[in-house]
Every structure is written in C-alpha cells, then in structure tokens.
Image (cartoon, helix red, strand yellow):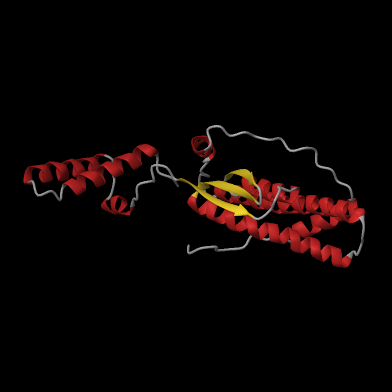
Amino acid sequence: WTMSVTREARIEKIQMLLALGQSDNPHESEVALAKAQQMMLAHKISVNEVEAHKAQEENPMHKIIFRSPRKRRTMQDTYVIWLLNDFFGIKSVYCNYPSAIQYTFMGRKSDVEMAEYLYHFITRYFQVSWEAFCVANPKQGAGRRKDNKSFFLGCYRGIKSILSESKKKIYQDTQEKGLIIVDDDRALSAYMHECFPRLRSISEGPINNYSMDASSAGYEAGLKFSVPQGVSAG
C-alpha cells in the first residue's frame, strides 16, 4: 500500500505545524497546534501516522563513480552492464581513459550500491565460468578466442533468463498482494540528463555466435547464477 502524494503532503504540513507548536511565542504555538489538530481530524490522520512518516528526499537519485582497470571495453563488460541496466534499477554511463574505463551508475542509493558490487561479482562469475569451461574442454589456437566470445554470449543469455523469471515472479507477487511497483524511469532519465546534458549513445554492433557448443555451455553456466545477498547493513 502506498500513500498518495496529497496525503503525504498533508502529513508533512502537520509535522511542520507541530514543530511550530513548540515555539516560545504562545500565540504562534497555539495557532499552529490548533491548525494541526484540525487537519488531523478533517483528514482522519492519526498521531501514530504523523510520527511514523518520514519525508521523502527532494531528489532520491544518487550516483557512484568507479574505474575498471581495462584498457578497452569488451563485450563481456557490455553484457554485465546490460544486465544491471535491465534488472537492477540503474542507468549507466562510461568513459574511456588510457588505462581504465570509468563507470557512473545512477539510481536510488541502495540500487547503485548493489549495482557496483554486482558489476564486479558478475564480471568475476563470467571469468570463473569460462576458466572452468577451458579446463573441461582444452583447446589451442584461434578457435579458443571464438569460443570465448560465444561462451560469454551464452552466459549472458542464461543469467538474463534467470533474472527475467525472478522479475516476473516479483511482479506477480506484488500484484497478488495489492502492492504497487514504483517506476523511477522518468526521474532517473531526468537525473541522468542533469548529470550528463551532452551524453552521446553508441549502438553496439551485431552479436556473432561462432560456436554453438561454447554458447550452450555458457548458457548452462548462466542458469546456475544466483544473486548474492546483503552487500551492506540493511
């Protein structure tokens, strides 16, 4: 259940009046308390509701900036960013430097903190899964590089499948409980434009699948992925 904006505004107005009720000026204090009581009675707002309410941040959006020690962006990086953008409530911007890639993640504070952690976690998951595949399927030469690209593509698709099912289940559960999923996309897009008014988008080229065997193995590895829990207090 989510309060309407109008009700939240009234509660915050009552909180302000109650604060004025502590004034040293007797007349100001009396008027403020009387007005607060009047609003609470008129709109059926309880004392407990007023005391429990916390005003929303003026702008709940945050950003985190960090660098990945890569000289150039790879498709592996791209797959990880696609997953974070699609399933973890953030938008991302990157900038190339001579010896690193700088990422800016934007969204609610808890989302960007989780996304930064998951960037490293999923990147490591890709690499560990690939190394296990190489041990099980020893191969040398140019074919190994093609296997690498196909394996990461399959792994991305496997993880995406897992997260899609999880997202669908969350949506169904919230609908059954009569809850509302908050859509921050418009506010997040505005915040991104505010941070990067001259942002330029680059289209990715076609995704080539060179090896069905490597791609299938990557997909199976992706299906074993699970999101880690609790990266900070709360």
Q: Left or right of 35: which side holds 107?
A: right
Residue 89 visible in the displayed image: no
Residue drawn at the location 84% of the way across and 63% of the way down: 133
Q: Left or right of 221: which side holds 43?
A: left
Q: Left or right of 189: which side holds 73?
A: right
Quarter holding residue 96: top right
In depth, the one of 78 and 160 nearer the eye is 78
Q: Is residue 69 above or below residue 15?
A: below
Residue drawn at the location 85% of the way across and 63% of the way down: 134
- Of all residues, the one furthest to the front in this rendering is 98
In depth, the one of 209 and 10 nearer the eye is 209
Quarter holding residue 231: bottom right
Residue drawn at the location 48% of the way across and 64% of the way down: 233
In depth, the one of 70 and 78 nearer the eye is 70
- Horizontal and vertical percent for residue 49? 31, 51
Q: How many marks?
A: 0
- Horizontal and vertical percent for residue 145? 86, 53
